[in-house]
Amino acid sequence: MPYGDSESVPDRPRAPVAIKILIAGGFGVGKTTLVGAVSEVRPLRTEETLSEPSSRVDPLDGVERKTTTTVAMDFGRISIGDDLVVYLFGTPGQQRFWFMWDELAYGALGAVVIVDTRRLADCFPSVDYFERRGMPFVVAVNCFDGARRYPLDTKRTALNLTPDVPLVLCDARHRSSSRDALVALVEHAVTRLSSGRHVTSAR
Amino acid sequence: MVALVSALRRVSLADLEPEQVAKLGPEHRRLLDACRIPVAVADLASDLDLPLGVVRILVADLREQGLVSVRQPAPSGLSDVAILKEVADALRRL
């Protein structure tokens, strides 16, 4: 995303731009697979306080504290030139990590919500979240082996998606297929901008 | 998470008061070294193998001491169609 110019960095033709894209969906739906298929995967963990709001944690001892939990995150980057990077963040699937979503969503371009047709309902919390937030998202139906193939229209109805939400088929194991889901999201964001619906991912 | 952290070039450890340097732990120094060119918080955490929360605290410490600048992504977000089209084109070439 574009950065504010309040603290400008000299010697650069334009401010570096980081595009943040979220990869969401239920547990085990293929988020990690998709991030791995399309980006340079980087190890990332976060340590979150579960109970009280951030007491100042000693950086050296923090990992050992019982008040925090360490969460491994799906994180990947796609470098597009020196000053443009796309970051992919997998949203934690388990309900107890929902508190992380707002931070992940802050300033994000949008989300790819992955769906497993055998467990459609698993994606509803993600879809609801992005709808409520007014964030652009696309739904990518992960074509698992052995899953029944339904026509896309049937899936749209089953997912109760509004017509403006792009629905794409995707095989998260394949780079080109995962890439197409990302492209669909970026194009969707452009369409929304062009039609005057501003991206409202701000907190 | 993707806020950019940059070491301020005009400041080096040699310019600091001894007590200021003493406040810096080894992680602070590693972080300062790692952000000589602007780098996203998430990349710093990954590069230094530290949890995001820890990196945030270290960055806040360094910022307090005037050693780094932090640029938050614009909250209004992605309103630049030209940049988004550039991204879409680049992704298609992957």
Image (cartoon, helix red, strand yellow):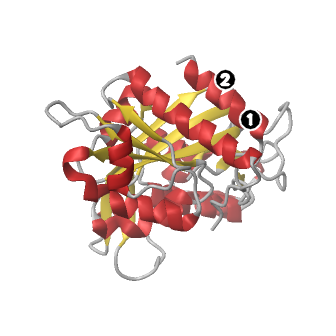
Is residue A98 left or right of A179 when viewed as pictured?
A: left
Q: Amino acid at mark 2?
A: Gly
Say which of B1 and B60 sits in front: B1
Which residue is the site of mark 2?
A81
Residue B72: quadrant of the picture: bottom right
Q: CA distance from mark 2 to mark 1?
A: 12 Å
Residue B58 percent coordinates (x, y): 55, 59
Check contact, mark 2 vs mark 1: CB within 8 A. Answer: no
Residue A159 percent coordinates (x, y): 35, 55
Dots 2 and 1 on the same chain: no
Q: Which element is circle 2 on?
A: loop
Which residue is the site of mark 1?
B83
Say which of B79 and A6 sits in front: B79
Q: Amino acid at mark 1?
A: Ile
Is residue A154 left or right of A100 when viewed as pictured?
A: left
* B52 up-or-down from A89: above or below: below
Chain hosting mark 1: B
**Residue drawn 32% across the image and 46% down it:** A115
Chain hosting mark 2: A
Closer to the observer: label 2 or label 1?
1
